[in-house]
Image (tube, helix red, strand yellow):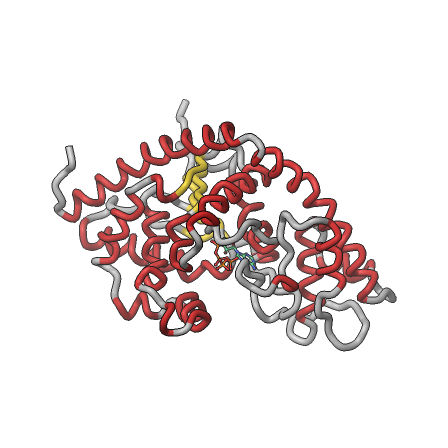
Amino acid sequence: MFCVPRLRAFSGIQPTSNSLHLGNYLGALRQWVRLQDAYDCVYSVVDLHALTVAPDPAALRERVRATAAQFLAAGVDPDKSVLFVQSQVPEHTQLTWLLNCVTGFGEASRMTQFKDKSAKVGDRGVTVGLFDYPVLMAADILVYDAHVVPVGEDQRQHVELSRDLAIRLNKRFGEGTAQVPEAVIVKAAAKIYDLQDPTAKMSKTGQAAGIIELLDDPKTITKRIKSAVTDSGSQITWDPDAKPGVANLLAIYSALTDRAVSQIVSDYQGKLYGHLKSDLAEIVVETLRPFRERTAELLSDPGLLDGILEQGRERARAIASGVYGRIAGRFGLLATR
Ligand code: AQP
């Protein structure tokens, strides 16, 4: 009997806040959990990426552990998936240098997230690290020979760059140098928007009132949803262009209940925005209640969390060192042993 090897998935989330938000959950984390039965999954707290926004060191240490606990609470299973902290696997930065040397400056300059983020921090805060972020992300993916990368829409361009670089390596150094990855983006939850500005994506570094944090208490969640910006008129209809606020609430509702938007719209015929908001608040609160409790449990047992991350580090290194050695060898670098 033939045993078909499973494909590999890689993804990561930055520890840039104490709590992840609903966009991270619906756009990424929930897909991660669903992929675990079909793929060999490698998931990372990408702390090196978080350095691009100059975090306070004590806060960063705490957030790395809090982010890992939230991965587990969402359902990442360390017996099935590799869960580790990026900076503990040095091959990520080693491969970044090799990739820097095949990435065009113009190519890196076209990354829209760099343009958005650098506009936010202004000239004095823009670092080479922020500019190089997509190349580090390409190294994260290629160093595991990942076939698929489950992410939200905002990361599509970065995964495209990873593909381009893998194809380039294969052309330059021969087929089999790098695995060409593909983004996995679930359309319905690909982009969750800010509750106060439904034209901007919900982001950890956005205004508090526009975000639903996964660790928020029920009162805060209810307040945020009830004060979400809705649009003129009172009819509940799906019209992302004319009614982006209502469309965002409907998208969240649909993603959390696995019901089609059209069904939800028809249930709310003749009802007001207030009804939709109250029901959605309850759905979000009840979905997140067990998540919040499990995260607190995990954070109260540091030994357990450290053990999981240590085991993940060893498993991640076992893969990354082999792949890095292969790619570095094709570049002409001498083997380290
Ligand atoms: N609003 C969103 N809707 C859907 N998916 C989203 N993701 C982020 N925001 C949304 C997905 O979550 C994963 C982790 O993202 P990240 O934290 O590593 O970086 P990010 O995309 O820059 O997320 P944030 O929240 O905006 O962080 P900050 O404010 O720190 O930059 C990715 O798969 C992303 O697509």
Instruction: Please tell me which residue is depicted at 62% across the width and 62% down the height of the picture.
Output: 208
Please state, as top left, top right, bottom left or bottom right, where the C terminus lies in the image.
top left
Q: Is residue 3 above or below residue 159?
A: above
Is residue 335 among what the camera can see? yes
Give coordinates of residue 228: x percent, y percent: 71, 66
Location of residue 298 (image quadrant): top right
Instruction: Please tell me which residue is depicted at 50% across the width and 46% down the height of the picture.
Output: 63
Task: Give the number of marks.
Answer: 0
Instruction: Please tell me which residue is depicted at 19% across the width and 54% down the height of the picture.
Output: 172
Is residue 11 among what the camera can see? no
Location of residue 277 (image quadrant): bottom right
Question: In the displayed structure, does residue 115 sit left or right of residue 239?
Answer: left
Give coordinates of residue 328: x percent, y percent: 19, 44
Q: Is residue 230 above or below residue 288?
A: below
Question: In the displayed structure, does residue 252 sit left or right of residue 152?
Answer: right
Q: Nearer the viewer, residue 316 or 88?
A: 88
Question: In the displayed structure, does residue 336 sit left or right of residue 52?
Answer: left
Give coordinates of residue 65: x percent, y percent: 49, 41
Give coordinates of residue 249: x percent, y percent: 70, 61
Q: Is residue 16 above or below residue 126?
A: above
Please state, as top left, top right, bottom left or bottom right, where the N terminus lies in the image.
top left
Among all residues in the image, which is located at the extreme top? 1
Q: Nearer the viewer, residue 308 or 173?
A: 308
